[in-house]
Image: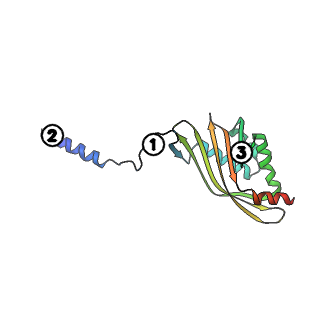
């Protein structure tokens, strides 16, 4: 009996010391978990590097054949995306991304999205003006490929430089 009481007290102490989760688990469809080091985050990093290096062809393989990439609600096919993103190098030097934050969300409903926040920086070839534009994007993944992506930024300064050419 003494051993049973001792075991009961010991078990009670162990269970009371167990760490409680900081937040309750949410099983709703739009909940899930995030990772910042996974295959999808790495593919977005590859895509952004390919853009900076003006080597968009090397990033085409992250997209499905019929993927749609929207830039401020203008829809592009993958081949149109490659052409459009490469053409920016005609007008800008030293294209870079700073303050990049990338994470992939695995939703309870099975959807997978990678989100990326960044500052786009470049020097206008026509004037030497340094541009810095905040941007945000997301990539939706199915079967290991991006099937849809979206990029949002204020194109005012970017378009003004291109209009000078």
From the image, tell me which residue sits under label 3. 70
Residue located 69% across and 49% down the image: 151
Instruction: Tell me whether the residue at label 3 lies in contact with that at label 1, contact meaning CB atoms closer than 8 angstroms.
Output: no
Residue located 84% across and 63% down the image: 126
**Mark 3 crowdedness (10 Å alpha carbons): few <14, some 14-19, many ≥20:** some
State the residue in front, 162 or 37: 162
Q: Which mark is residue 26?
A: 1
Q: Which tag is nearer the camera, tag 2 or tag 1?
A: 1
x, y percentage for residue 142?
A: 62, 35
State the residue in front, 155 or 146: 155
Q: Secondary structure at mark 1?
A: loop
Reading the chain from its start, which is encountered first: label 3 or label 1? 1
Mark 2 vs mark 3, CA separation in Å? 68 Å
From the image, tell me which residue sits under label 2. 3
Q: Secondary structure at mark 3?
A: strand
Reading the chain from its start, which is encountered first: label 2 or label 3? 2
Q: Looking at the image, which residue sits at the far left? A: 1
Res. 145 image quadrant:
top right
Mark 2 vs mark 1, CA separation in Å? 40 Å
Instruction: Please say if 36 is above or below 64.
Output: below
Res. 93 image quadrant:
bottom right
Horizontal side of residue 139 vs 124, given as left or right: left
Residue located 81% across and 50% down the image: 87
């Amino acid at each position: 009996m003494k051993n049973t009481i001792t075991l009961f007290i010991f078990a009670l102490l162990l269970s009371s010391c167990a760490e409680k989760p900081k937040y309750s688990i949410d099983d709703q469809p739009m909940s899930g978990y995030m990772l910042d080091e996974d295959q999808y985050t790495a593919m977005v990093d590859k895509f952004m590097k390919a853009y900076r290096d003006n080597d968009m062809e090397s990033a085409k393989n992250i997209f499905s054949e019929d993927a749609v990439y929207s830039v401020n609600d203008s829809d592009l096919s993958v081949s149109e995306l490659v052409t459009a993103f490469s053409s920016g190098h005609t007008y800008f030097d030293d294209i870079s991304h700073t303050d990049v934050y990338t994470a992939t969300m695995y939703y309870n409903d099975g959807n997978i999205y990678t989100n990326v926040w960044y500052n786009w920086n470049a020097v206008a070839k026509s004037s030497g003006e340094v541009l810095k534009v905040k941007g945000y994007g997301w990539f939706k993944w199915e079967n290991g490929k991006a099937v849809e992506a979206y990029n949002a930024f204020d194109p005012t300064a970017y378009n003004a430089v291109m209009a000078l050419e």
